[in-house]
Image (cartoon, rainbow, N blue to C red):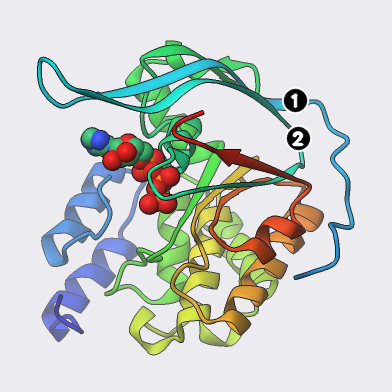
Amino acid sequence: MPANLSSDQQTALDSALAAFDGDEHQLIKAINDQVNFVRPTARQPSRHQPTGPAIIELRDISRRYKMSKSQQISAVTNVSLTMAEHEFVAITGASGSGKSTLLNLIGGLDKPDTGTITVAGHDLTKLSDSALSRYRGQTVGFVFQFFYLQPFLNVSRNLEVPAMFRHMPAAQRSSQLKTLAEAVGLSDRLQHLPNELSGGQMQRAAIARALVNQPRILLADEPTGNLDSANASAIIDLFHHVRDHFGTTVIIVTHDAKIASSADRVITMHDGE
Ligand SMILES: Nc1ncnc2c1ncn2[C@@H]1O[C@H](COP(=O)(O)OP(=O)(O)OP(=O)(O)O)[C@@H](O)[C@H]1O
Ligand SMILES: [Mg+2]
């Protein structure tokens, strides 16, 4: 991946962003024209104990991958569980036990073969593609191990783009940006490109971006897998801050025992169960 855009490309991208008039297809096209959009479309126990009603309910969820006529892999098998609003949940388990598959199902990135997933009263398995896409953009925020920041947009723009897709008015976008940059300690890095940030700062930017549309649920798949232990601790503190401050339900897939011990609840997957 090239480190920088040419000045012509940068100008074209900046003007496309400046000219954004609510047409997200135009904006995505403008970005894709210039760059490779990277992603397609031990603490003390937690201060807050979950008290809210259920926000996520999985009933008998199974997800199988069909490899050939005679072979299929059961990634998730008959999982039923409930998560409360404002809960901080860690999902652990051996490699291949189905953690990411489960998270992707909750996030509406994948559909189960059987069972129902109800989030905030909506059965995800019954949503149309466009309703599911709105769900992914509005109700959930995603954080991944490799950040997936847009390399040619500065931090400020990286944070703003998901809000543009949601047609958030400019004034609200800018106030959201300010609040989140402060929350993640990046107020003085907004003009930096991702490659001008440390790993911990990149992950903090990715977390702020995931929060820009004020999702009720934050889903993170090994968000500290790429960080040293000091940065990993800071990121975990930040997830707790997000839950306490914004009331977000947080679900983190992790191999890190320290993170798991900081959660309200640990769910351990064994061979998809
Ligand atoms: N697209 C796919 N096609 C076929 N099999 C898949 C696919 N995605 C995952 N699997 C299989 O499903 C099982 C669960 O995978 P999953 O990615 O959910 O594991 P995981 O617990 O997240 O593992 P890790 O800790 O290594 O990330 C694995 O056996 C995996 O090989
Ligand atoms: Mg995984």
Work out whether 35 lies above or below 132. Answer: below
> Which residue is rendered at x = 44% and y = 73% of the image?
226
Tell me which image quadrant ligand 1 sits in.
top left
Q: Is residue 110 above or below residue 138?
A: above
Residue 13: percent from left, percent from top: 22, 69
Question: Could you tell me which secondary element the residue under label 2 belongs to?
Answer: loop
Q: Which of 8 and 79 is in front in this view?
A: 79
Front position in the image: 162 or 223: 223
Work out whether 33 lies above or below 128.
Answer: below
Provide residue 169's location: percent of width, then percent of height. 53, 50
**Which residue is found at the position 34% from the left and 84% from the top?**
195
Q: Name the residue under label 2.
A: 85
Report whether residue 164 is seen. no
* Relative horizontal placement of residue 209, taking residue 66 as reference (left or right): right
The amino acid beneath tag 1 is: Ala
Give the CA separation, mark 2 to mark 1.
Answer: 6 Å
Q: In which quarter of the image is the N terminus?
A: bottom left
Q: Residue 54 carries which label?
A: 1
Judge left or right: residue 183 versus residue 172. Answer: right
Q: Are marks 2 and 1 in contact (CB under 8 Å)?
A: yes
Q: What residue type is disc 2 on?
A: Glu
Residue 263 lies, with reference to residue 83, above or below; the image says below
Which residue is at a point 14% across and 80% down the rendered structure image? 2
Q: What element carries label 1?
A: strand
Label 2 or label 1, whichever comes before in sequence order: 1
Q: Along the line of sight, which residue is nearer the eye, 28 or 203?
A: 203
Check disc 1: other Cα within 10 Å, few if <14, some if 14-19, many if 20+. some
